Image (cartoon, grey):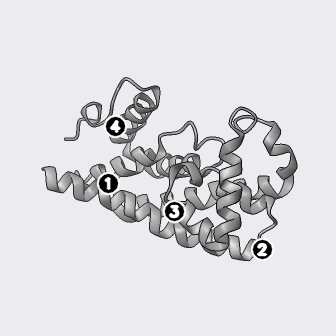
């Protein structure tokens, strides 16, 4: 059995939240699909991503797959759906409220986060939406920037879905392989 308290630094409130979520999933596998989807949504949604330990939870979901607690296919599908929805909402917010975003938390306090996301998107465009998924600080703001910069929705949706289809399985498989190699 995996002891999540040893795999994460309990000193951080983020890590403590991740441990609690994983303990809940382990004790209640029937809720796993919902929790994994919500986790991927939180990690991909612009404002929650900065506060949410979604990557750690998705990697740890792989350990629960290794232990036979979670079924791989529904876990990955739920993660992909949550990730796609999180970015879609962020993109929509960027389209709808773009000029207001620099004036609200967290960008009012840390304007460089949004500025970096916009610069990254301007430099890489649709590829930036795909690549941004794999880098925590960018994952939170590139969909917003794409919406703010009026990216074509069809191009955004394509990059969003394709990146989620690669990102979620990569994290889950990494956790599964890590557990198998240590076990």
Is disc 2 in contact with disc 1, using a CB cutoff of under 8 Å? no
Sequence-wise, the earlier of marks 2 and 3 is 3
Give the number of the disc on residue 20.
Answer: none
Sequence-wise, the earlier of marks 3 and 1 is 1
Report how far apart the C-alphas of labels 2 and 1 lie in the structure.
34 Å
Report how far apart the C-alphas of labels 3 and 1 lie in the structure.
14 Å
Query: Which is closer to the viewer, label 3 or label 4?
Result: 3
Q: For the residue carrying disc 1, how many other residues have a C-alpha within 10 Å: few (<14), some (14-19), or many (20+)?
A: many
Give the number of the disc on residue 62.
Answer: 1
Q: In what element is the residue under mark 1? A: helix
Q: In what element is the residue under mark 3? A: helix
Residue nearest the viewer, comparing 4 with 145: 145
Residue that appears at 57% across and 68% down: 130
Quarter of the image holding residue 119? Answer: bottom right
- Relative height, residue 40 to residue 126 (above, below): above
| Image location (x, y in percent) of residue 86 | 63, 54
Q: In what element is the residue under mark 2? A: loop
Give the number of the disc on residue 152.
Answer: 2
Quarter of the image holding residue 112? Answer: top right
- Report which residue position mark 4 lands on: 27
Sequence-wise, the earlier of marks 2 and 4 is 4
């Amino acid at each position: 059995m995996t002891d999540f308290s040893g795999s994460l630094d309990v000193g951080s409130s983020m890590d403590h939240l991740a441990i609690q979520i994983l303990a809940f999933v382990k004790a209640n596998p029937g809720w796993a699909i919902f929790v994994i989807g919500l986790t991927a949504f939180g990690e991909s949604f612009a404002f929650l991503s900065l506060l949410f330990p979604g990557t750690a939870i998705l990697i740890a979901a792989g350990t629960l797959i290794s232990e036979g607690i979670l079924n791989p296919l529904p876990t990955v599908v739920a993660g992909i759906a949550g990730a796609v929805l999180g970015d879609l909402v962020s993109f929509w917010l960027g389209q709808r409220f773009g000029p207001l975003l620099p004036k609200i938390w967290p960008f009012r306090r840390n304007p460089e986060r949004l500025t970096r996301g916009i610069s990254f998107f301007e430099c890489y465009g649709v590829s930036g939406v795909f690549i941004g998924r794999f880098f925590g600080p960018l994952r939170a703001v590139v969909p917003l920037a794409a919406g703010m910069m009026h990216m074509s929705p069809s191009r955004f949706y394509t990059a969003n879905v394709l990146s989620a289809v690669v990102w979620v399985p990569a994290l889950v498989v990494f956790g599964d392989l890590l557990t198998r190699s240590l076990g």
